[in-house]
Image (tube, rainbow, N blue to C red):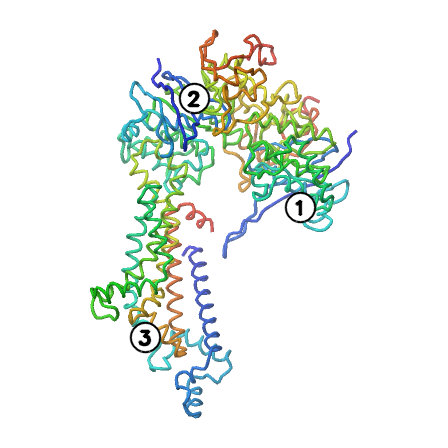
Amino acid sequence: MSFISIQGLTVAFDGTQVLHGIDLEIGRGEALGLVGESGCGKSVTWLAALGLLPGKARVGGSVKIDGEELIGASRTQVERVRGKRIAMIFQDPSSSLNPVHRVGRQIMESLTLHRGLKGQAAKAEAIRLMDLVGIPSAATRIDLYPHEFSGGQCQRVMIAMALAGEPDLLIADEPTTALDATIQAQILDLLSQIRAETGMAMVLISHDLGAVSAVCDRAAVMYAGRIVEMNDTAALFSAPRHPYTRGLFDAIPEIDGDRGRLKPIHGTVPDPRALPQGCAFAPRCGSADTRCHTRSPEPQAGREGGLLACFHPVAWAVPLMTSPQGIPA
Amino acid sequence: MPKFILAKLARAFLTIMMVMTFAFIVLRLSGDPAQVLLGPDAPLDAVIAFRERWGLNDPIWKQYLAYLTQIMRLDFGVSMRSQTPAINLVLERVPATLALTIPALILKLGIGIPAGVYAALHRGSLADRGVIMLSIFGFTIPSFVLGLVLVLIFAVSLTWLPSGGQDTYWHAVLPIITLSIGGIGILARFSRSAMIEVLGQPYIRTAMSKGLPWRDVVWKHALPNAAVPIVTLVGFMVGALIAGAVVVESIFAWPGVGRLIVISVANRDLAVVQALLLVIAASMVIANLLVDVAYGLLDPRLRSKRAAH
Amino acid sequence: MTALLLEARGLVQQYDTSRGLFGRATSVRAVDGVDLQVNRGEILGIVGESGSGKSTLGRMLLGLERPHDGQVLWQGQPLPAPYSAAWRSLRAQMQLIFQDPLAALDRRMTIADQIGEPFIIHGLAKGAEAMAKVAGLMARVGLRPDQAGRYPHELSGGQRQRVVIARALASSPRFIVCDEPVSALDVSIQAQVVNLLRDLQEQSDLTMVFISHDLKVVRNICDRVAVMYLGRIVEEGPSDVIFSDPRHPYTQALVSSIPKAGTGLSHRVILQGEPPNPAARPTGCAFHPRCGAADRACALEVPVLELNRGRLTACLKLRATGAQAA
């Protein structure tokens, strides 16, 4: 049962359309991955949904949370949803915290706003949250400033702040991209642990397919402002149908097995000001024909479940990845 | 006392000493005070007696040493013209100057900063463009032109306000306006860009995404960060409180520090010019120290950098 | 046939942090005693997290920074002092490619002019000959001839990195240090550039040091890998060996931190604690505060690199188990 429903969401900056109608449903407690390369619109989707885009952005379509429309809603209406129902964390944790305020104050601000906690009660709860996200000696470090924390710990503070409103959905926008490998692992671990404990839904926006597959139940692949494929993580990762999804998987070097040449996707992501006619991926696609260059494929439910926007999907039977034991991963 | 304060004070002292030394040398190279004060027709023995009396015949290093020992005793010399202590001449002029510059500073802060912040918050609007245009006008027009234009309009044509002197409060109105216009323009422009920069920072997006009402985002998250660069500029303005009105005082015949500078330099009244420079340098150095303190209060990153010292 | 091209002996780099007028100067060791051999025609990977000293090491290998201690030998001869005449002439043979191509390129010059610049600097070619060579280089790195007159901002990130690579190749170098060359690129473009580097290496028998935090890319392109932690090499050996069977606890954590599609988080070694900070180096083995296997000895003794199952490791616990096994 979905409590967030996005329908036909479009975004344009200065007359250039960057989001071409996104349809997405998110169920309670579900973890959805949004995958794609830079500029594909995966972050813009959620910034638009929460009204966080700059004023010059033109947003159309519909985003409903439990039936309540957010697009075109008044500022106070949207502000009531932000942080309380939908919280967000970002790519660069160190600059996402206000440098002139103590981290405790920044967490307590959310607690006061969303749960009416003040004074000692707010402080105690902030310390509890910092403990929860794994910041050692939280009781003393609550009075420190963001620059006194490492990048990984700033992300933990951001997560604590997001949890302060007890949201139904957490949007994690590239939460580990700016962090070192071992710290990335810690943060991903923390996010899935928190999801398991609180039962909140999560959207993980990432270009890291591995991270998405490790944390999410379902994943959507975006290209040039559209969702081109969406399915359960297991199905999507074992047998991607869209040539772009398949290309993304093939382009990633493997950590075991063959060390041969990589299989890149040829060409580059199209400029949103000059999108090709038809399917935006057609110029880079090996199986594109004249139809692909003239008509844009609509997302359709696949036989195997999920959604797919392609006239010439990759054959279903091709197994993509096998683990060393020979079991499909 | 924290080490960084000691270091700052040492640097401040050095700065003042350098200004004093520079002034001392330049003044002595730029003309003979005896000739200037006594006039071109003065008898030779009068000139010689004058030079003897003020020690002007000694080699310059000897004069400099004498001057230094004098200063160490907090004795800033005597005016060659009026025979009164130079520092008294300077200090008695300070209140008159501050009577212009402090109200002007209040106007600069009170109008410039809000105008800039408002423009930044309504970027691209008609008000924003208005603020940009007026601020460019403000800081490009030279104060002597502005002063004369204001006199022509309000004193000569409309005769609403006096054109010069210090007799009533009304006399201060035109000088204060002349003094403040440029600063308002600069501050508005500067506050606008500081605010726009801050509004584009990721932590502002964070503050919005946690559901804070817009006015809290602005007041609690954007303004405290935008204040850091603005304080630098305000510091300059505070530093110029004593010395910043030379032109305007001349236009409006206002008997302040600025007028004294012009007169004493013209007369080669060495002790007075030196005392003036000392007071001006000290006021700027103090303003700088205040800016440093303000930085520490506003930005914890700078505070902890110092704690590491 | 392995012939030594470049050798680092006991390299140390430390930076003094100035503490103002009355403060005491302290020093931070970025690289703390690195021995490394680079063989002709191989691609050597250097991996590590921020603060591991991998970029500093790369710059010292090129002679761009003078080491605080130790030396770099190029074909058996010590590297000349940075910015000396001898160093300049050697520079044609040694090049650096780093992460941000936009910062490496001049915004006001066309890409053809920038690719041809080394010809002029090193007096290698001019006029029509230089233009022909530029066209040849552009073709080699996969740039179209019609892009010659473009400016850097008119190209995509991947294309800019190709320009940087073409310029590095202009002086026919024998040795290239690539510092995070594909980290800023999208996955699909990253693969294009990695393949390009592999092809170039094969075609002209280049020797490369490939610095990256991306283990998958390093494994794909590098013959040999050195893993760094807080300025020291903790494990070094052939890529296949290191990634299929990491022995050092830090390498094990690094390898297991790579999310694998479809496997969830359960199998992973999650390291506790903070990333390494060169300003606060732990005693003994620098990794011991985050290491699951560490004991008291690890806090006291600094482990040295020694041979262990076909690779070098610096770990007291491995030495102990190795001795038992033997």
Residue nearest the viewer, comparing C287 with A101 = A101
The reply, left or right, for residue B61 in relation to residue B285 is: right
Eye-nearest disc, 1 or 3: 3
Q: Residue C105 at x, y = what percent? A: 59, 41
Q: Residue A237 at x, y = what percent? A: 52, 15
The span from disc 2 to disc 3 (Cα, nearest Å) is 75 Å
Q: Which mark is residue C214?
A: none
The subunit carrying tag 1 is: C
Query: Where A146 sits versus A165, above or below?
Result: below
Q: Residue A159 at x, y = what percent? A: 40, 29
Kind of residue indicated by mark 2: Gln
Kind of residue indicated by mark 1: Asp
Decide: few, some or many residues near mark 3? Use Cα within 10 Å; few <14, some 14-19, many ≥20: some
**What secondary structure is found at the residue carrying circle 2?**
helix
Kind of residue indicated by mark 3: Asn
Tell me the quadrant of the picture where the N terminus of chain C can be found.
top right
Residue denoted by label 3: B88
Query: Where C172 sits versus A201, above or below?
Result: below
The subunit carrying tag 2 is: A
Residue denoted by label 1: C69
* Label 1 close to label 3 by CB (< 8 Å): no
The span from disc 1 to disc 3 (Cα, nearest Å) is 63 Å
Residue denoted by label 2: A193
The span from disc 2 to disc 1 (Cα, nearest Å) is 46 Å
Residue nearest the viewer, comparing C197 with B161 = B161
Decide: few, some or many residues near mark 2? Use Cα within 10 Å; few <14, some 14-19, many ≥20: some
**Would residue B268 be seen by someone viewing this image from the given angle?**
yes
**What secondary structure is found at the residue carrying circle 1?**
strand
Q: Are marks 1 and 3 on the same chain?
A: no
Residue nearest the viewer, comparing A130 with C301 = A130
